[in-house]
Image (tube, grey):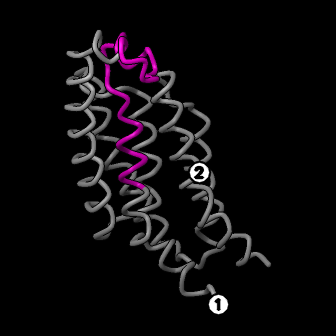
Amino acid sequence: METLLADAAIFVILPLCLAISAFSDLFTMTIPNRASAIILGTFILVAPLAGLSLTMIGLHLVAGLIVFAVCFTLFAFNVMGGGDAKLLTASSVWFGLNSSLPEFLIYVSFFGGVLTLLILAMRSQENTILASGFPVPQALFTAKKIPYGIAIGIGGFLAYPSSPLMLHALTRVH
């Protein structure tokens, strides 16, 4: 029963929290702190139930610490928002120190760049877009930041199937 619950959490929690965070960032330019807390807390509860050894759990937490150190530095230089840093850090713990972490970070970087270019282009055409009647959240035009939670969400969705927890859970699906 514990394994079934752990697998269900593995399939649902990270993707759901990433989706909620992306939509929240799109419409409000904020990422709820509870999403990052749920991601991290659920990992700590689910990892042992999913069969990860203490060493593996430790390596996943180290991955989060490494990402946190980079994000904290970017935040300190006002390059990254606090919500983005927390979400990226918490999500990184689910990937761990293996090839799925760089895959995740590359996806996030790529889609973050595309998102930034898209929003900058939209902002330069604000009057045309508003005149067209196309529904665009006003915050995309007025905020001075980019809703990077969208890129984190997309990157997470694309890289998650190759993460150790997801691979482990997929092997038990009949």
Is 103 covered by the magenta stretch?
Answer: no
Q: Position of residue 136 (x, y in %)?
A: 43, 23
Q: Is residue 38 left or right of residue 66?
A: right
Q: Quadrant of residue 75?
A: top left
Q: Position of residue 139 (x, y in %)?
A: 42, 16
Specify the amino acid type for callout 2. Leu
- For mark 2, give the secondary structure: helix
At x 42%, y 69%, the residue is 163
Q: Quadrant of residue 68?
A: top left
At x 61%, y 56%, the residue is 13
Q: Position of residue 93 (x, y in %)?
A: 45, 56
At x 38%, y 57%, the residue is 62
In whole angstroms, how far apart are the C-alphas of marks 2 and 1?
23 Å
- Label 2 belongs to which residue? 16
Magenta span covers which residues?
Answer: 130-156
Q: Position of residue 112 (x, y in %)?
A: 27, 40
Label 1: how many Cα within 10 Å (few below 14, some 14–19, many 20+): few
- Label 1 belongs to which residue? 174
Q: Dividing the image into 4 quarters, which one contains the N terminus?
A: bottom right
Specify the amino acid type for callout 1. His
